[in-house]
Amino acid sequence: MAQITDVKIPSPGESITEVRLGQWKRGDGDWVEKDELLNEIESDKATLELLAPAAGVLRVKAESGSDQKVGAAVAQIDTAASKPAGSGAARPMGTAAAEAAKSVATEPTGKATPTARKMAEEHGISLAGVQGSGPAGRVTRADVEGAMGKQAPAAAAPAAAAASAATKAAPAAVVAPGSRGARREKMPKIRQRIAERLLESQQTTATLTTFNEVDMTEVMALRAKHKEAFEKKHGIGLGLMSFFVKAACSALRAYPRVNAFIIGDEIEFHDYCDVAVAVGTDRGLVVPVLRNADAMSFAQVELAVRDFATRARDGKLTVDEMTGGTFTVSNGGVYGSLMATPILNPPQSGILGMHAIKKRAVEDPDHPGQIALRPMMFIALSYDHRIIDGAESVGFLKHIKDCVERPERLLLGL
């Protein structure tokens, strides 16, 4: 007699009511183990793993790519079915890997997701040595994959070379000149949400943009001078983002309206600086948040931004990590943008746009009246004119310019 367990869509967050199913990892009628990854569901903010709640035979009830309500039963598992012979065969494992797997099995299970635990066991990765990037430091599948890459770089190199060779051998199809073909594909949930937010921003805010330019000479010299020592101590390079995030925090303290929201007929001021950093992915732009960025060191900012970028590409950012910023910094310069007008992310009242560094002929600040070739960057502040006056916006942007051109001001809190 069949005993059925429903596979239901979990809730990615309180504000999310609908998700989109990805490709099923196992087919209808396949045997699945408890906690096995069945699907990766996509919401308008994050990607979530759909795991098997029990072992048994899988019965798929919803198609890949379909939109489903949170709580909907998209599959069922017949837990009374008999396990097919040979379906649980273990993967071959070396002696050292097998010993490591035994140690993994004895570790506490609460610190890792089920998928991460299973992957760690299969590949002999000790969870004790894996730094978790999930909520409350929980180890995720991406963390285990990262640990696998560190453990066997020699094996990864030939694989990467083979993949590169395969790519060269099988180039993407080229559309013939004069072709009038057309195709349609479903817009990802996250891009649908981005479109809604951008339209909302244009319709509900009085957006203006002011520009300035920053001489990057001192920052570039500082980075060159301390590059090796910084990376040796902190394990990451000294980038530009940390300078601009810290400069933005200093400017937000000086101009608190830029860090405020309009809520109805009130202005909500914030004593903290939660700075969102725009990260581009193939699914769209996401804006994870640096909580209390004003209290973070340069190294902490750089490490957090790198972590955000890595997990954003893998779709592993949580809803909480992308919610609640009070101000946003976006670096279009990494794509070569010389100048642009960033769009506000409501209810935020301001967003800073960074751009490409180009050498331009300007007046030499050390020798007035003389022309020098200096590395310059245009910066832009888009702001809600309902709450921020023009003089404030100009002052805010000049404050950032002063901090970046004279980075010692950040150290001195000026």
Image: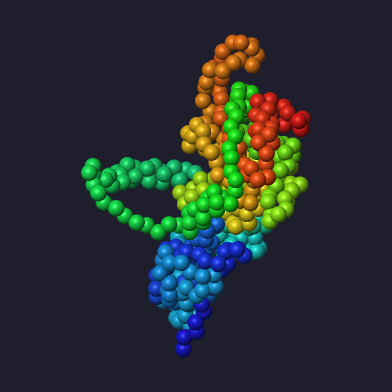
Query: Residue 163's spot in the image, x, y percent?
Result: 38, 46
Left or right of 258? Residue 19 is left
- For residue 383, above or below residue 3: above
Residue at left 40%, top 59%? 186
Q: Residue furthest bottom?
A: 1
Between residues 266 and 114, which one lies in front from this camera angle?
A: 266
**What is the total number of numbered labels drawn onto the structure image?**
0
Left or right of 404? Residue 286 is left
Dividing the picture into quarters, in which one does residue 397 lie?
Answer: top right
Left or right of 29? Residue 253 is right
Residue at left 61%, top 15%? 364
Residue at left 60%, top 57%? 319
Position of the C terminus, as image quadrant, is: top right
Left or right of 258? Residue 47 is left
Query: Residue 310's spot in the image, x, y percent?
Result: 54, 47
Q: Is residue 181 visible?
A: yes
Dividing the picture into quarters, in which one does residue 83 lie?
Answer: bottom left
